[in-house]
């Protein structure tokens, strides 16, 4: 099967990662997956306000995901929406699993992810960008988190759904994965599929994540060793 | 003994496996998971005997006891000062940490340290609840008047200071600039002219950028000497 953009089913979109793009952030990264662009900035660990939300034995991770008003064909209303709140929460949790939060009791690590251009897979791009930004900021982590969406279109398993594919797919399964720990930190699903499908899709996603991990490492290496 | 997967000074990214063996011990910025030792931070591997550690390339300052730090007074309270030291926790300088007797009811505390003053102090205590106390009893401790403040990456402070102060001493000697480097990544400097200060800032920024290079002291020495010659011609 050939896809709309000429990719093979197991191929990722064109992937481009750059670390250290924001001057004032502790760490930052820009990720481009095809036509989806995410920019992430990490601030902190820093003091958390309001004080009553501080956790006594660990740091809090606050991730804010926003879509730029001009990111899609139809204008996105600026500010928080039901959708952006959900994605902020799941992406934050996916990253929190990798961070040594106990190293910074009472503090907060603020991550801001902005989607500059959207063409499906924004949450996966957001997680990829935020994970590189966290490593760039020198936050202690168990592993880099890489994320990709997999799905099933007309009986074929496809990786990294783009644009119209997402609407055409019978199911959409975004995952976040820590390669060297071999652990999943995010698993969401849209649509209907069988248990066997999930097993096969996860295996496919795992392989795709290893490719993303390689690109993330290259980006960090380029930023710090040149 | 298990085989090391990384060499000394190899670049690491969080999650990189350094060794799969119980013979080695995880040091700074490393952790153990099962039999393996993994890197916790982005940095360079450092091996000393059986201990594997990672020298971080970036990160914020975490206060530790006996660190000499530079901070800004941000608030005056009934019996002490609140100091911003660039850490995730605010530091507190109690009256008991200041020389001499001071009665907050009778004396104006802002005459001692006012909001906005930069001070050079020593961390006296970091409690388990992350409350940080400073004291000004150390010989070098003082309030700065004049000079300039420069923020650097706290992870690069050891590089700026050099082995037992070799790098910073060389800069001081060759430029005649007075420099104090706080462990928290805040640098105070005062030179004879603005040009000297600007030059020293350039030098410190070069050290930060090239900190991963070996033999950096020689390179910086050349940079300093080059300027010295230029000055004589003028």
Image (spheres, helix red, strand yellow):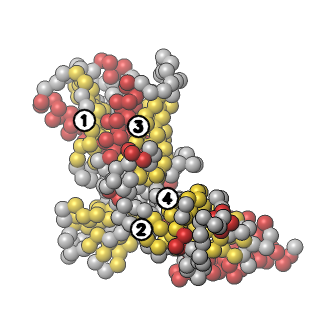
Residue ID for mark 4: B90
**Distance CA(mark 2)–CA(mark 3):** 36 Å
A33 over B161 or under it: above or below? above
B131 over A68 or under it: above or below? below
Q: Nearer the viewer, residue A109 or A7?
A: A109
Residue ID for mark 2: B126
- Which of discs 3 and 4 lies nearer the camera? The answer is 4
B81 over A176 or under it: above or below? below
Q: Quadrant of the N terminus of chain A?
A: top left
Whether the residues at callouts 2 and 1 have beta carbons within 8 Å, the answer is no
Whichever of labels 4 and 2 marks the residue nearer the N terminus, that label is 4
Which numbered dot is residue A126? 3
- Whether labels 4 and 2 share one chain: yes
- Locate residue A94, reporting x and y percent: 31, 42
Which numbered dot is residue A20? none
Q: Secondary structure at mark 2?
A: strand
Which quadrant of the structure image shows residue A138?
A: bottom left
- Locate residue A43, reporting x and y percent: 48, 48
């Amino acid at each position: 099967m050939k896809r709309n953009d000429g990719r093979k089913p197991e191929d990722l979109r064109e992937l481009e990662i750059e670390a250290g793009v924001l001057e004032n952030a502790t760490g930052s990264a820009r990720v481009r997956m095809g036509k989806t662009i995410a920019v992430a900035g990490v601030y902190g660990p820093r003091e958390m306000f309001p004080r009553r939300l501080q956790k006594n034995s660990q740091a809090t991770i606050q991730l804010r995901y926003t879509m730029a008003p001009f990111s899609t064909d139809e204008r996105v209303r600026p500010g928080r929406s039901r959708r952006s709140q959900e994605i902020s929460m799941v992406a934050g949790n996916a990253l929190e699993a990798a961070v040594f939060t106990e190293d910074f009791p009472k503090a907060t690590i603020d991550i801001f992810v902005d989607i500059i251009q959207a063409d499906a897979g924004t949450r996966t791009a957001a997680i990829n960008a935020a994970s590189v930004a966290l490593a760039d900021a020198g936050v202690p982590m168990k592993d880099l988190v890489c994320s990709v969406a997999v799905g099933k279109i007309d009986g074929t398993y496809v990786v990294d759904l783009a644009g119209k594919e997402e609407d055409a797919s019978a199911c959409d399964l975004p995952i976040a994965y820590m390669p060297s720990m071999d652990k999943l930190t995010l698993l969401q699903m849209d649509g209907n599929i069988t248990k066997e499908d999930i097993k096969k899709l996860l295996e496919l996603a795992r392989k795709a994540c290893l490719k993303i991990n390689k690109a993330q490492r290259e980006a960090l290496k380029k930023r710090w060793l040149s | 003994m298990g085989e090391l997967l990384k060499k000394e000074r190899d670049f690491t990214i969080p999650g990189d496996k350094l060794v799969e063996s119980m013979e080695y011990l995880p040091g700074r910025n490393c952790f153990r998971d099962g039999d393996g030792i993994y890197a916790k931070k982005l940095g360079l591997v450092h091996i000393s005997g059986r201990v594997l550690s990672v020298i971080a390339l970036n990160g914020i300052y975490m206060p530790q006891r006996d660190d000499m730090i530079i901070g800004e007074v941000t608030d005056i309270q009934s019996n002490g000062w609140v100091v911003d030291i660039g850490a995730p926790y605010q530091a507190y300088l109690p009256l008991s940490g200041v020389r001499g007797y001071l009665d907050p009811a009778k004396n104006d505390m802002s005459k001692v340290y006012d909001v906005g003053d930069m001070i050079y102090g020593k961390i006296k205590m970091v409690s388990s609840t992350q409350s940080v106390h400073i004291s000004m009893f150390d010989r070098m401790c003082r309030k700065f008047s004049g000079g300039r403040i420069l923020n650097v990456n706290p992870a690069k402070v050891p590089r700026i200071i050099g082995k037992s102060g070799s790098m910073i001493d060389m800069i001081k000697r060759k430029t005649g600039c007075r420099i104090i480097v706080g462990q928290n990544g805040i640098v105070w400097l005062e030179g004879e002219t603005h040009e000297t200060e600007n030059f020293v800032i350039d030098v410190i920024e070069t050290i930060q950028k090239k900190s991963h290079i070996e033999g950096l002291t020689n390179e910086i020495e050349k940079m300093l000497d080059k300027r010295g010659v230029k000055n004589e011609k003028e």
